[in-house]
Image (spheres, rainbow, N blue to C red):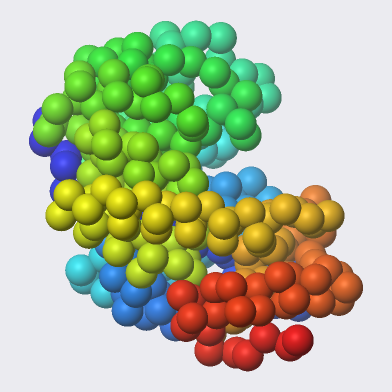
Amino acid sequence: MNQNRIRGLVAAPFTPFHADGSVDLAKIAPYANHLSNDGVAGVFVCGTTGEGYSLSIDERMSVAAAWAAALPKSMRLIVHVGHNSIKESRRLSAHAAASGAHAIAMMPPFFFKPSGVEEVVRCCKEVAAAAPELPFYFYHIPSMSGVHLPMAELVPAAAAAIPNFAGIKFTFEDIEDFQKCRGWAGEDYDLFFGRDEILLSALRVGATAAVGSTYNFAAPLYLELIRAFNEGDNTRAEALQAEAVRMIDTVVKGPWHPLAAFKWLMTKVGVDCGPTRLPVNPLTAEQITILESRLAGFIEERLKLTEPLKV
C-alpha cells in the first residue's frame, strides 16, 4: 500500500505540565502554532519525548485529542499507542482514530519483551486492528524498548500480516539496516528516521522524513540542512549537521537528564512546557545557570530566542 504521505520533519512534542505535574492542555494550541510557523510537517505525540509512559491512559487520550483539535489542517498527527498491555494499546488506538489522528504508532512491549520478529508482528497486528482505517507504524527504538531486532526482517513481515501497516519510525544508529529497509520499501512505505544527530547520513541512503525531539526548537536548522542536501551542496549540509551535533552536545552533556534540558530550552523559544515528570528530575537552578552560560553566544541567533539568556 502507498502510505508515503508525509515528507520533511515531524516533531516529537514534549507534553506540557503545570508546576504541580498535571497536564497543561491549554499550552498545546500555541505549541502547534509554533511548530507550524517553523515549517514542521506533523507531530508524533506521547512517545519518548512526550513522556508517554509517564502518563496515565486518560492523560494520553486527552493529550492526543488536544493535538487533534489544535493542529492546522496542513499538519499530520501520529499518536503513539504503545503500552505493555496490548488491551490498553488497543484502547489508545481506537481513541486516536475517534479523535481525528492521521496515524498511530507502537513501541513494542518491553515488560515482557517479545523474543523475535514473529511475536512483535503479532502484537502489532492486534493493536493495528483496533484502528483499521489508520496507517500503522512500528516504533523501533531499542535504546528504550530493549527490543533489538533487524528492521529489514520486520518490515516485510509486518507488511504481509498487517493490512494497514504503513512503515516504521527508525530511532537507531544502524544506517545499514535502515538502508536495507529503504531498499525493500521503495515508495510504498514511510520510513521515518529518528536520530537527529545523523539525519544527513539517513538522507544519503534515501530518507525522506524524520521524527525528532530537536525539531521542536531547531526545525529551521534541519530544514536548511535538507535543502542544502537536495541542492547537492554537501559542504553546506555537513556544516549544518555538525552545527546540530554541537547544539545537541551543548545541551545534553551535563549532570541532568537530556529530556529535562530540552524541555527547559523550549521556554527560550516561547513555548513553556513546564517541568518533567518523575522519574525524570527537572533542572535545578544551578543546572539552568550552567546551561544559560553554555548557550550564550552559541545558538541564540540560530534558535531566534524569544527570552534572553541570563549571563
| Residue situated in front as seen by the camera: 74 or 8 | 8
| Residue situated in front as seen by the camera: 305 or 55 | 305
Residue 172 in view, yes or no: yes
| Residue situated in front as seen by the camera: 220 or 259 | 220
On screen, residue 95 above or below 156: below
- Where residue 272 sits: x, y (%)? 60, 80
The quadrant of the image that shows the N terminus is top left
Instruction: State the residue at coordinates (34%, 37%).
Output: 202
- Where residue 116 sits: x, y (%)? 50, 9
| Residue situated in front as seen by the camera: 100 or 21 | 21
On screen, residue 310 above or below 210: below
- Where residue 279 sits: x, y (%)? 80, 51
Image check: 110 left or right of 125? Answer: right
Residue 99 in view, yes or no: no
Q: Quadrant of residue 15?
A: bottom right
The quadrant of the image that shows the C terminus is bottom right
- Where residue 256 sits: x, y (%)? 79, 56
Q: Quadrant of residue 166?
A: top left
Q: How many marks?
A: 0
Image check: 121 left or right of 172? Answer: left
Image check: 94 left or right of 111? Answer: left
Instruction: State the residue at coordinates (43%, 15%).
Output: 150
Instruction: State the residue at coordinates (49%, 81%).
Output: 301
Residue that sits furthest to the front in the current view: 235
